[in-house]
Amino acid sequence: MKFINNLLTIFPHYNAIENAQMLIERQRKILFYFFGSAIIFSLIFGEAGLSGPQDYWFVMQNRIYLFLTVGILALYHKNVIKLHTALIACIFLSQTTTSIEMIMSSIAHTPYHLMLIVGNMVLLAFNILFCIVAYFKNVAYILCVCSLAIYGVCVVLTKDEALLNFYGVYVVAFCLTGVMAHHLKRSVKQLYQENNKLKADERDILRMLRTNKSEIKAYIEMARTNLTPQQTTLLLEMMTEDSKQTLLKNVKNLIKLQEADFLLLEGIFPELSPSELEICQLILQDKKLSEICTILNKNESNINSQRAHIRKKLNLQTSQNLKTVLTERLKKKPHLQ
């Protein structure tokens, strides 16, 4: 029973870790489609003249950006490239085009273009945020350094004091973002290490039992639930014939052993009722009150009441320990197996 309890602990935990891996992959996929769609819609608005600079070179750059983004989405949809590659490609493409736009704005050097530089730094910050949400720590580091470097180039090209005043704020903000990425990466690494360890444990357990997952799940379900005969039969059918016969044989042997122990107790304590003998049997097995309640499907007050009756029938004093007295009586007879 202790082994089954260990399985109840290990396998749900393993499934939780395995689900965490699937969650990361699903999150990246959602992020990829959201990120790609946001870029495409924003570029379409720009093409329609509803947002962004409308200078010739800016418009041409946005058209190239739109074409490449749609291309990445199409390549992923056709399974030409993997999700990891497609998402990183979108992020770096966004970083590159935004950085080029900032350099071009620095050269234009109008109040509107200076405001555009500051606005694009917000877009670069979102780029880094997407990396963190997608669990790309190293990419986030690279983008932090590149973003600060590009902004520094813009400050040098424009020689604008207002842009220079913002530089310190951006350095602090982007460095803190890098620290967040580091902690996130470490947590994910620990998650994968634990996942690998649990996978190894699972393989060892299944090898030791010479069984498979479906059989283990059947064992666990039988240990957890009070089943009807039909449900028990259904779970037994999930096992191989050898495993089923071995399980039934072991259960029969255990029942025979418990019956022999019960008959021995009954011979030593004829004054006790069958339910009281069951409690004595569990007490001798070092079962705690909560365990006895679970095994016999009774509440604590009921068990305590029966223990009091047992003590009274055995003429025990308040200072005497029930288990000790039972053990001493048994020493005068053959031991329980």
Image (cartoon, grey):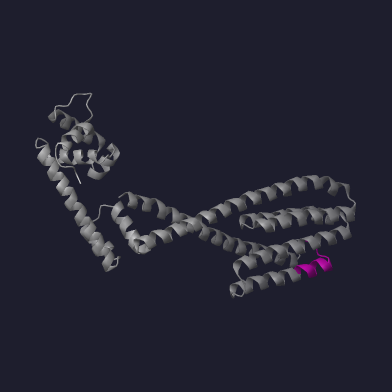
Residue at 84% of width from left, 57% of height from top?
Answer: 113
Q: Nearer the viewer, residue 284 or 33?
A: 284
Q: Nearer the viewer, residue 11 or 207?
A: 207
Residue at 19% of width from left, 31% of height from top?
Answer: 325
Residue at 75% of width from left, 71% of height from top?
Answer: 64
Q: Position of residue 298 (x, y in %)?
A: 23, 40
- Picture layout, residue 325 above or below residue 52: above
Horizontal relation, residue 96 to residue 81: left or right? right
Question: Residue 70 appears in which quarter of the rendering?
Answer: bottom right
Residue at 61% of width from left, 64% of height from top?
Answer: 33
- Picture layout, residue 94 above or below residue 312: below
In magenta stretch: residue 74:
no
Point out the stretch of residues depicted in magenta.
52-62
Most common secondary structure along the magenta stretch: helix
Horizontal relation, residue 45 to residue 258: left or right? right
The total number of labels drawn is 0
Q: Position of residue 93 (x, y in %)?
A: 72, 65
Question: Residue 68 appears in which quarter of the rendering?
Answer: bottom right
Q: Position of residue 20 (x, y in %)?
A: 51, 56
- Picture layout, residue 115 above or below residue 243: above
- Picture layout, residue 222 above or below residue 328: below
Q: Position of residue 223 (x, y in %)?
A: 29, 53
Q: Nearer the viewer, residue 33 or 52?
A: 33
